[in-house]
Image (tube, grey):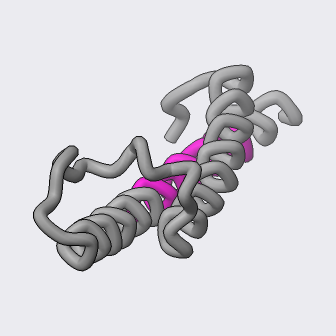
Amino acid sequence: MKICGPKLSLCGLIISVWGIIQLVLMGLFFYINSVALIEDLPIDEEFNSVEEFYTAATSAYNQNAYNCWIAACIYVLTLLLSAQQFYVNSRATAN
């Protein structure tokens, strides 16, 4: 079933591939607790102890990593839909 045209399906393919690469890498960097991403963590500004901060930061890093990987999986679905549409459009123009 044709849902979108050839240009839109190609655009969807390119954006999906880029989204997958970016989100998998961001998830990896969150998972290894990259200091560069600390500003993106949803944690409080002040803590009573260093251990409390480390616990909150580790939990937030892991949650953000999982969120990135879930979003990458959604991009895989978008990639599959775009690839199917690209295939349908290429077959329609070949006939």
Residue 58: x and y in percent read: 34, 73
Residue shown at the point (69%, 41%) measured from the top left: 13
Asked if 32 appears above or below 14 in the picture, the reply is below
Asked if 48 appears above or below 92 in the picture, the reply is below
Residue shown at the point (88%, 35%) measured from the top left: 94
Residue shown at the point (64%, 60%) measured from the top left: 25
Residue 51 appears in the figure: yes
Among all residues in the image, which is located at the extreme right?
A: 94
Residue 74: x and y in percent read: 43, 55
> In which quadrant of the rendered view does residue 29 lie?
bottom right
Among all residues in the image, which is located at the extreme front?
A: 49
Instruction: Write the start and end of the magenta stretch as one range.
Output: 70-88
Instruction: Give the side of residue 6 with respect to residue 43, left or right.
Output: right
Residue 61: x and y in percent read: 38, 65
83 in magenta: yes
13 in magenta: no
Instruction: Give the side of residue 31 with respect to residue 17, left or right.
Output: left
Asked if 57 appears above or below 55 in the picture, the reply is above
Residue 59 appears in the figure: no
Main SS class of the magenta portion in the image: helix
Nearest to the observer: residue 25 or residue 9: 25
Q: Quadrant of the C terminus?
A: top right
Asked if 5 appears above or below 50 in the picture, the reply is above
- Total numbered badges shown on the rendered structure: 0
Residue shown at the point (31%, 73%) measured from the top left: 54
> In which quadrant of the rendered view does residue 50 lie?
bottom left
Among all residues in the image, which is located at the extreme left?
A: 48
Residue 3: x and y in percent read: 49, 31
Nearest to the observer: residue 10 or residue 22: 22
